[in-house]
Image (cartoon, rainbow, N blue to C red):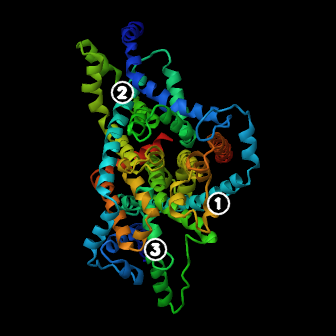
Amino acid sequence: MKRSHKKSLTSYNNWGYAFVAPFVIVFLIFSVYPVLRTLYLSFTDLKVMGDAHFIGLENYKRVVTDKFFWIALWNTVRIWVVNIVLQLGLAFLLMMIFSDVKYKMAGLPVFRVVYYLPNLIAATSVAFLFMTLLDWRFGTFNQLLSALYRAFGAHYNPVDWLGTSNTAGYTIAVIQAWMWFGNSFIMLMAAVQGISKDYFEAAALDGAGRWTIFGRITLPLIKPIMMYVAITSLIGGLQMFDLPFLMINRASPSYASVQTVMMYLYKFGFTAGTIQTGYAAAIAYALFIIILVVSVIQIKLFNRGED
Amino acid sequence: MGFKIKKSILYIALIILGLTCLLPFMLMVVNATRSGAEISQSFTFIPGHNLQENWNRLFEYFNLFAGIRNSVIVAVPATLLGVYFPAMTAYGLAMYKFKGNNVIFGAILAFMMIPGQLSLIGFYQLCSTLHLVNSYIPLVIPAIAATGTVFFLRQYIIASVPTSLVEAARIDGANELYTFHRIIIPLVSPAMATMGIMGFIGNWNNYLLPMIILTKTDKFTLPVMMATLRAATDLASNQGATYLAVAISVIPILLVFCFFSRYIISSISAGAVKG
């Protein structure tokens, strides 16, 4: 019975090639080839145009000794850490509130949509909205703060949030967290809602308190998704580009403090006058290796408490 | 009693957080109607009378509607190709046993993990060799190879399309393509909508790639056009016009959100289930 069933299928199985062919062709041309081409270029001295000469690991040696690459990496990590702590912390807190068995908060569908809203908007629009709001002298944000200070009888000295090295990176980190916490929250919440109600009911019947339920049922069961959220945020965060690139002017004194690895790559890859394609390709792969290593460490850390 | 108070405090905190999500947009709408001088003096939530002037000022600088049109020309076909072909691929991978099936699936998994920056340099080099700079082809055609969508739809088909259904269609003499178009697509369409709406937002908001591929002003998509505001020092003196530009750029995606928020939420949730 089973054998004849299989046989009836095999005659059709060649259709599989037809169904996957368009994907495979485009995938090879526009996904696989560019990644391999970047790898090849990272071993060459290609500048703007002209011939590429194979120079072995020279570009990688240069990355390792390039002070500005490490500064860019440090900037990226610094902004990312503040961003991720705020973003995931807030998402986690909200998840705790909405999954609490005692308070049973209502209105999740509405809150979810509102919290997600900032994530919907293009980074370019967010960038110009906040650049204008945060304008040092004429921006609405400093006016709000000043009014708030005045209400408490204090005087507010306007801060140039984006133009000062001390604040620019963190300001961007907060905006980035503002853009993404709703997204993380929806993911965590989806994980909680995916847990069978039976577990909660059984635990409640056994007299488990809400903290026990949260610690012993909710947390362990959403751990894989927490890891997924953490790793995707890491991959996205280390590639941070749009906001710092758009919001901080090249001429600004704070530029050096927010130049991320991707901005550094962009400088050598695409900025007229400084193009060194081979070196930019090596930066791309160096960043990839760093992302890979940190992801593995993250997975190891997550799984440590397993046994 | 204490319980009710605590619960109220929680609600207030949640609402305040909600307001911080909305506040920048409210200020944006209000400030879009005020003059630069008014904005630089104080803030308010009462609209001003300068909308017309801001509008004129803005459109003297650039035509945002051309950017919106270009974004539609890129994002709509990219979205359609980005669900139709991945659905086809997912169906092929899920329903047919052929040589290389597992290799393709393995490659899809691997490429879902590879960060986009890794292909950026090579992608541009490829486009420049193929003379595709300033063409929309590199922004549209690669959508066919949306690995995440293929992965998601494959799981969906395996979970929700019974093989017996396809076999029944075969017994009735249906051609394989006919089966895919008439039986499978209707069954998978909720998942395709979920992926499609996310794909649309991604394509619509995409900045880095269009900025690299497009150099001619008349080809600029909305985000690339918006980014040129950075160099607009004459416009910077009039904050009202900048706010108006942001407001106009945000409207199309907000409209999409109003109609499809359910799909958007479920697609992010799907991302969680995927993990």
Q: Quadrant of the N terminus of chain A?
A: top left
Name the spot of residue B187 as percent of width and height, x first. 29, 32
* CA gap, disc 3 and disc 1: 36 Å
The chain identifier of the residue carrying mark 2 reads: B
Q: Secondary structure at mark 3?
A: helix
Query: Which of A10 and A205 lies nearest the eye of the viewer?
Result: A10
Q: Give the residue at mark 2.
A: B88
Q: Quadrant of residue B50?
A: bottom left
Which of discs 3 and 1 lies nearer the camera? The answer is 1
Which of discs 2 and 1 lies nearer the camera? The answer is 1
* CA gap, disc 2 and disc 1: 43 Å
Residue B10 shows in this picture: no
Q: Secondary structure at mark 1?
A: helix
Q: Quadrant of the C terminus of chain A?
A: top right
Q: Identify whether B169 is placed above or below B131.
A: above
Name the spot of residue A81 as percent of width and height, x first. 62, 59
Instruction: Report whether mark 2 lies on the same chain as mark 1.
Output: no
The chain identifier of the residue carrying mark 1 reads: A
Which of the marked residues, 2 or 3, is nearer the chain's N terminus? 3
Q: Dot 3: few (<14), some (14–19), or many (≥20) neighbours within 10 Å?
A: few
Q: Is B118 on the left or on the right of B21, as rendered?
A: right
Pick out the residue farthest to the bottom: A153
Name the spot of residue B264 as percent of width and height, x first. 36, 49
Q: Give the residue at mark 3.
A: B6
Q: Give the residue at mark 1.
A: A78
Residue B59 shows in this picture: yes
Residue shown at the point (47%, 40%) measured from the top left? B274
Check disc 2 and give the amino acid type. Answer: Met
* CA gap, disc 2 and disc 3: 52 Å
